[in-house]
Image (tube, helix red, strand yellow):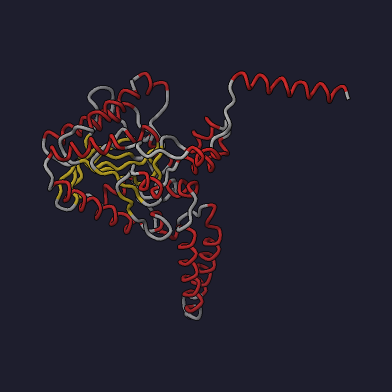
Amino acid sequence: MSHANSSQSVPYLPFEEEVAKIDQQIAQLESEDSLQGKHAIKIRQLQVQQTELLQKIYSNLTPWQTVQVARHPRRPLLGDYLSMMFKDVRTLHGDRCFGDDKAIVTALGQIGRHKVMIVGQNKGREIKEKIVCNFGCPNPEGYRKALRKMKFAEKFGLPIVTLIDTPGAYPGVGAEERGQAQAIAVNLMEMSRLRVPIVCVVIGEGGSGGALGIGVGDRLAMLEYAYYSVISPEGCAAILWHDGTQAPQAADALKLTAKELIKLGVIDAVIPEPLGGAHRNLHDTLYNVEQYLVRTLNQLKRKSIDELLEARYRKLRSIGEHCLNAQELKPHIPERLSAKAQIEKAAREADEVKVEIQQ
């Protein structure tokens, strides 16, 4: 599994044009300055300017811009976490039923002093890896593999760490034939009563049931610029507006950012990302996630299993208690006419056309 590159080779997002210009100026001055050092002061001024600009941009991201950051091609993926954050990683394969889904990786490993079962979604970095991993969209056998390994962890008293990063479960015919919905539903039920601590972290995309299939636990955290939603913005726009270009408006309505979800009580913590997003500083991102996991596992291990299960049950039952004001949602949802109203509207439009023709 490949690793994220340094920030020097990071592609720029559409809203980072000014940052790109400053970086180009810095690179040009550095190439001219390799021997004399005459541009050092100017380079320092541009670096300060770039930092201030990044702070301004990333403190005011729109939901759609947050989605773009979560999908950045250089964002740390599961492979980076496995190779750099966990120790003694031993990958486990197969669901003993159909096959070994590459979109979900299960492994034994250690973080801090804790031996854990790791379950994560892998999207792949290069195009060949993306195809093998199905672009991070798991099939039913992936969820069944995850459940088998989580049951194994329960048997030996190992805490479970899940790293969520998927646009959604694979919606193909084969996946449906093999019981995609049932596989996810069974995981939801079984994870809710596993007798070991479970910590879930959304590290990138948290899309639909694909994320939920490994997302039930005692604690659910998100990286600062990840997103977590019942559907992708494009999917929501296609359903409500029949127009995928309305994705930015859908992203705003879905309340999918960490900032919104912590207010709604859906998630328990927001893990900070380095300035400019996780793709600009791989090591600081992994360090922040590691510190959160170690701290949370220490807290959960102090509680009895019965306490954990009771708290997990109450947590799951409380999701959805917050009811948004209908007026708050109204601007985002297109008007839906009844069948009778649609017929009457069509008749009025036809009459208007006839009048225009007669005139």
| Residue at x 81%, y 21% (from the top left corner) | 354
Location of residue 18 in the rendering, given as x and y in whole percent from the top left corner: 55, 61
Q: Where is residue 239 drawn, in percent x and y?
A: 52, 30
Residue 183: x, y in percent?
30, 25
Judge left or right: residue 140 versus residue 279: left
Q: Quadrant of residue 190?
A: top left
Q: Is residue 321 above or below residue 56?
A: above
Residue at 38% across, 21% down? 176
Task: Check the image and report above or below for 55 versus 134.
Answer: below
Which percent across, then down, holds residue 79?
31, 45
Which residue occupies the extreme right position in the image? 359
Left or right: residue 200 versus residue 354 is left
Depth order, front residue of 214/31:
214
In depth, the one of 109 and 125 nearer the eye is 109
Q: State whether residue 22 is above or below residue 155.
A: below
Dividing the image into 4 quarters, which one contains the N terminus? top left
Tell me if I can see residue 148 in this picture: yes
Please tell me in which quadrant of the rendered image residue 130 appears: top left
Residue 135 in view in this figure: no
Question: Which residue is found at the position 11% from the left and 42% from the top?
Answer: 304
Total labels: the figure holds 0
- Answer left or right for 314 relative to 55: left
Q: Quadrant of the C terminus?
A: top right
Nearer-the-camera pick, 357 or 44? 357
